[in-house]
Amino acid sequence: MTMVETAKANGLNPRGYIEHLLQGLSQYRTTPTEEQLAAYLPWNQIETTAKQTA
């Protein structure tokens, strides 16, 4: 499954999810821990900006 398909399967707007990933992960100065990365998995997303509105 691709990132886009996984985002869709979890009720997320794929573009919003990928933008969220790029913006959030770019803030780390070092390699994120497994726990930090897990927060970005599509099934762990609760941000309304990434949720589909349609």
Image (spheres, rainbow, N blue to C red):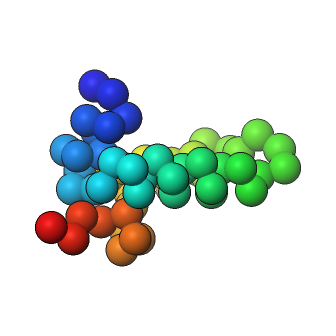
- State the quadrant of the N terminus: top left
**Quadrant position of residue 5:** top left
Which residue in the rendered view is the most extreme toward the bottom?
48
Depth order, front residue of 20/10: 20
Residue at image x 23%, y 46%? 8
17 horizontally vs 7: left or right: right
**Extreme residue toward the right, this view:** 29
Q: Residue at x 74, y 56 (%)?
A: 27
Is 54 drawn above or below residue 3 in the view shown? below
Q: Position of residue 18 (x, y in %)?
A: 46, 47
Above or below residue 45? Residue 29 is above
Q: Position of residue 17 (x, y in %)?
A: 42, 53
Give the quadrant of residue 4: top left
Q: Position of residue 19 (x, y in %)?
A: 51, 53
Residue at x 62% of width, y 57% of height:
24
36 horizontally vs 31: left or right: left
Whole-percent x, y for residue 25 in the image: 65, 50
- In the rendered image, the quadrant that contains the C terminus is bottom left
Number of callouts: 0
* Residue 39 higher or lower than 2, as above or below: below
Residue at the far left: name it. 54
